[in-house]
Amino acid sequence: MALVNENFLKLQKNYLFVDIARKVNAFKATHPKANVIRMGIGDVTQPLAPACIEAMHKAVEEFSSKETFHGYGPEQGYDFLQEEIIKNDFAPRGIKLDTSEIFISDGAKSDTGNIGDILALDNIFGVTDPIYPVYIDSNVMAGRTGVIDEKGYWSNVHYMPCNAENNFIPEIPDRHLDFVYLCYPNNPTGTVITKSELKKWVDYALANDCIILYDAAYEAFIQDPTLPHSIYEIKGAKKCAIEFHSYSKTAGFTGVRCGYTVIPKEVMAVTENGDKVSLNQLWLRRQCTKFNGASYITQRGAAAIYTPEGKEQVKKTIDYYMDNARLLSGALKELGIQTFGGENAPYIWFKTPHGESSWSFFESMLYDAHLVSTPGVGFGPSGEGYIRLTAFGQREDCEEAVSRLKNWIK
Ligand SMILES: *Cc1c(COP(=O)(O)O)cnc(C)c1O
């Protein structure tokens, strides 16, 4: 009989959103008439920008005749999209990149989850706590994390707690790390990093030969013009950082699937013999072997985000979500609850008012106000005592949620 990859058995049994769904279903079974409002899972609700729809319709038509049909595309993505990315997401910020440094993919989850393929198993890596669970679980599957303790910490992972006490700024490690995951604006806390804080990380990475895996999935939600949209806005970052982007939250592509990863040619790792190897080359090889590219139709849809109409339409949807965020965090603040995030990110993170545990508050909120949240502890031990709300819902639901919160927490 085949032996299984036992690393998979080390994964914690329960997946956060499965647990939540189970609890919500149990509530619904006993309260069939309740109008439950979901502010839990981070999925978008507004339709795609018409510019994207139109571009994808046109792309579908091309498949209908042999003259304009498309077969396999380049594994790295089409240059029409790579060029728009460089022209719109990087050049205006003074960042120079080549199309060969942009890898189009089916989203940032795959890329943040797969990037570990090109790094050795005995590397020591760091994560913020709380964290987007993919960064840890993909390393558990790879066998890089060691053993888990009763609090939920893995022995080979360096954790950097982020909480109200340190204003959600992870402390620069006092030890060597080979790579580190950073995500700003942050999921789950909705908090941001300033250029000067990010510069400390780039300096640390350069001084320690550490690679920063920078997840910029929420950069489009940044409202404060002084905040960095890309780590490459920081001098030296092209030598030490890989950056992940996604159209999922930016442009409602969660169901369409498209994103991209930037690996500058200068980012190097080392062999056991001490030879430097470009990670761009390794990732290209990895993608060409294991990935056949995002679909042509999808990439045409993504390119339309960068047209004048596309930009305007996408911004309107982001503004809609950010208005939701302001509504929700404004209401919580009025109730005297300390909230974080929600200003440059579609997530609101708050401390439970009387020190309840995340799950206990989650259940009261579900049973008393019929509102679904996400328990902060699901994102890591330091999330205990916190709750995450998403601003991705319908406006009417947000307004209703606000009025229920005001009646419930008095
Ligand atoms: C939603 C999200 C992503 C994007 O995932 P896709 O696979 O592109 O849909 C990446 N990172 C974080 C932190 C996210 O919350």
Image: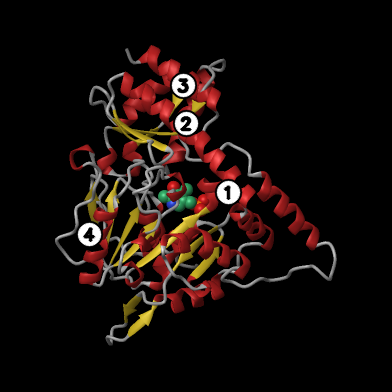
Residue 88's tag is none
Q: Position of residue 252 (x, y in %)?
A: 57, 45
Q: CA distance from mark 4 to mark 1?
A: 32 Å
Q: What's the residue at 45%, 79% (across, down)?
A: 281
Residue 200's tag is 4
Q: CA distance from mark 1 to mark 3?
A: 30 Å
Q: At numbered mark 1, what does the secondary structure look like: helix, strand or loop?
A: helix
Residue 323's tag is 2
Q: Which residue is mark 1?
A: 311
Residue depth check, mark 3 versus mark 4: number of the one nearer the observer: 4
Identified by mark 3, the residue type is: Ala
Q: Which residue is mark 3?
A: 401
Q: At numbered mark 3, what does the secondary structure look like: helix, strand or loop?
A: helix
Ranked by sequence position, the earlier of labels 4 and 2 is 4
Ranked by sequence position, the earlier of labels 1 and 2 is 1
Q: CA distance from mark 2 to mark 3?
A: 14 Å
Q: CA distance from mark 3 to mark 4?
A: 39 Å
Asked if the residue at label 4 sits under 8 Å from ligand 1, the reply is: no
Ranked by sequence position, the earlier of labels 1 and 3 is 1
Q: Taking 39 as reference, is 191 left or right? A: left
Seen in the picture, residue 406 relative to 389 is either above or below; the reply is: above
Q: What's the residue at 43%, 50% (across, down)?
A: 219
Q: Taking 62 as reference, is 372 left or right? A: left
Q: Position of residue 216 (x, y in %)?
A: 42, 54
